[in-house]
Image (spheres, rainbow, N blue to C red):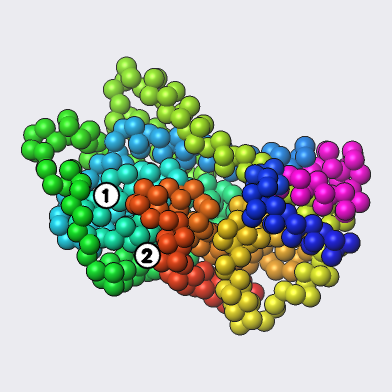
Amino acid sequence: MGVVILLVMAAGVAVMLTRKLPTAFALVLLAVVIAFLADAPLTGKGSVLDTVLQEGAPALAATMIAILLGSWLGKLLEETGIAGTLVRKIVEFGGDRPVFVALGVLAVSAVVGTVTGSAPAAMLAGLIGIPAMIAVGIPEVTAAGTVLMGIAVGVPFELPVWQFFSTALDLPIDTVRGFMVKLFPFALVAAVAYVLVESRRRGVEHTWSLKSVQARPSRGDRRRRLGDAPWYALLTPAVPLTLALGLDVAIIPSLLGGVLYALVTTTRPREMNRRLLRTLYGGFEVAAPPITLFVAIGILLAAVKLPGAVDALQPLVKSVSPQNTVLFILVFTLLVPLCLFRGPLNVFGLGAGIAGVLVATGIYPAVAVLGMTASYNQVFGVSDPTSTQTVWSAQYAGVSPHQVMLRTLPYVWAVAFGGMCVTAFTEL
């Protein structure tokens, strides 16, 4: 039966790759089929209806709320001008020095990446940052990749991601945070290397087209014309991170602290109610797609953790899973491309189910599975041509997502290799 379940999972990958069904729908269908193959009853304990669907759907509720709050904070960064001001200040500081401008946009993208992910993060940093880089001579592909690499630098400190891995793998937040801190230097070094190498290797391509770079407003009316946020409001992205990382505050209160700080530092009291509601509703629109996906992932995790599924899959998965430290690093590093194109190792797809199998069957410790999946997530978030942030950044820069994938993949592959090394030598 284990072989049949693996074949069904492979069929699920094919359905998602060919886009016959949306990923969330395919995951739910896959979960129901796996549950029936695992001899789960229709109702009762360990059943399809009560355990897989009823208990699985809200299993990642804390992650969904964190995603919503991150999206809400992202909308506040957009509406209050905090994100735009950060980018403009960096562009002004970099002047006409391409590498300095690119490094500055990289830094802002990393800051935004700690707050929210996916396309909203790319838009917050890229709407001004990508044209600014192109205007000073950074090639279009490099400009798009810079925003994505920057967001990836922030992902190890993105609080909703911490919550997701904590809930999905049943790990304490402290454990997730500890690994993410170890992963951060690899992401940072790879991102800086990308900017330095790609901007020099491709050369400067001047396309002076950004009016805000060429025509600088006078100092007196700059804030009025560009909508600059107050300097103290620019600290908003650091607030939730400081609360969670520095003061050990829980994820949801930390994100709420960021929302409150952004509101108080940018909004007059009589306008607070309207801005709160407007940005919250906007946050719901942004958060709807990932929340739908997390409902489906919770259902899939519930299915693969059923006793029948665990018993059927354990001997098969154990026979092909490397236990040697060096083999672990080599095999799972070579498998990096399988997290692209919504492949089987994409943690926000079938990869979550595979991670659940590895944990439920006891093949690897949960913290080792965390290291593996978090490393793959660094690749998916930058180079997957089907991810929303990659598509948006590439199209906005005027290139194809596949061009961005080819240019960024070697760098994020190196990040994944670093994450696998840390995982193998510390957790196996």
Can you see residue 175? no
Q: Residue at x 40, y 35 (%)?
A: 75
- The amino acid sitting under disc 2 is Ala
Q: Amino acid at mark 1?
A: Pro
Label 1 SS: helix
Say if mark 2 contacts mark 1, CB within 8 Å. no
Residue beneath the point at 19% across and 59% down:
206
Comparing 31 with 68, the one in front is 31
Q: Quadrant of residue 373?
A: bottom right
Measure how far apart labels 2 and 1 are at the Cα level.
19 Å
Give percent across and percent down for residue 403: 42, 62
The N terminus is located in which quarter? Answer: bottom right
Q: Nearer the viewer, residue 71 or 139?
A: 139
The residue sitting at 38% across, 55% down in the picture is 399
Q: Of residues 163 and 375, which is closer to you in this image?
A: 375
Can residue 63 be seen here? The reply is yes
Check residue 217 for magenta coloring. Answer: no
Percent x, y of residue 144 = 36, 56
Q: What span is colored magenta in the figure? A: 27-52
Q: Residue at x 89, y 38 (%)?
A: 43
Residue 278: x and y in percent read 42, 24
Q: On the picture, is 327 further left or further right than 192?
A: right
Q: Nearer the viewer, mark 2 or mark 1?
A: 1
The residue tagged 1 is: 131
Query: Does 360 sit above or below residue 332?
Result: above
Compared across the picture, whether 67 is left or right of 115 comes to right
SS state under label 2: helix
Magenta stretch encompasses residue 51: yes
Question: What is the crowding at mark 1: few (fewer than 14 residues within 10 Å), some, or many (at least 20)?
Answer: many
Q: Position of residue 304 (x, y in %)?
A: 78, 54
Q: From the image, tell me which residue sits under label 2.
A: 191
